[in-house]
Amino acid sequence: MDPLSITASVIAVATLAAKTCVLFTSLRQTYDILPGRLHALNNEVVDFEAVCRQVVATLNQRASAKLSAHCDDSILHLIQQAEQTLFKLQTILHSLTAASHRSRLSSANAWRKQQPQLEQLQETIKTIKCSLNILLGASHS
């Protein structure tokens, strides 16, 4: 795959991460207090977006210097995985927002029901972020 397509994919996922952060803000406004798990997950998404920006900068540097693109397939795979994860996260955040409009009991039940999946998504985002950081380090060496 050409470097421009990979860069476009990374930018698209970084934008998706930013939109996910907007959903966290909306959820924070709906509920007065968010559980710590959601704050931590929001922080992971913000960090992931920053890593995506670093990946774009590295890809641009590498393209302008005409360096080897040996990590591109790995980066693309991680970006596709991140995109799926962020879409799942957005679906959950939308469902939590919808539950908040029904009643306190249904919103509390929704939190409890989504807790394991939110934890899994947080770990997935953290793993992808760390893998991208490792690939960035490898491409700079």
Image (cartoon, rainbow, N blue to C red):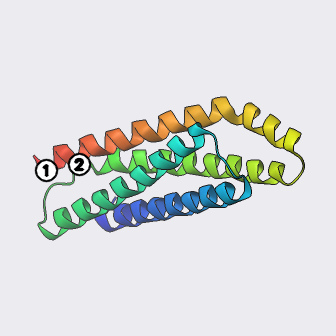
Residue 96 in picture, x, y percent from top left: 75, 48
Tag shown at residue 136: 2
Q: In this view, does 28 lie to the left or right of 40?
A: right
Q: Which residue lies furthest to the top in this view?
A: 116
Callout 2 crowding tier (Cα within 10 Å): few <14, some 14–19, many ≥20: some
Seen at 74% across and 32% down, the residue is: 112
Q: Where is residue 5 in the image (x, y as percent from the top left)?
A: 37, 65
The foreground one among 38 and 64 is: 38
As drawn, the label of residue 42 is none
Residue 54: x %, y % from top left: 28, 58
Q: How far apart are marks 1 and 2 (CA)?
A: 6 Å
Quarter residue 53 falls in: bottom left
Considering every residue shown, the one lying at the far front of the view is 32
Q: How many marks?
A: 2
Q: In this view, does 139 lie to the left or right of 3?
A: left
Q: What element carries label 2?
A: helix
**Whole-percent x, y for residue 107 in the image:** 81, 43
Asked if the residue at tag 2 contacts the one at tag 1, i.e. Cβ–Cβ closer than 8 Å, the answer is yes
Report the residue at 73% width, 37% height from top. 111
Report the residue at 13% width, 65% height from top.
66
Q: From the viewer's side, name the closer residue of 136 and 36.
A: 36
Q: Is residue 28 left or right of residue 73?
A: right
**What secondary structure is marked by label 1?**
helix
Residue at the disc numbered 1: 140
The quadrant the N terminus occupies is bottom left
Say which amino acid is labelled 1: His
| Crowd rating for badge 1 (residues with CA inside 10 Å; few <14, some 14–19, many 20+) | few
Amino acid on which the number 2 mark rests in the picture:
Leu
Q: Is residue 30 left or right of residue 61?
A: right
Q: Say if 60 sits above or below 71 in the image.
A: below
Residue located at (22% from left, 60% from top): 58
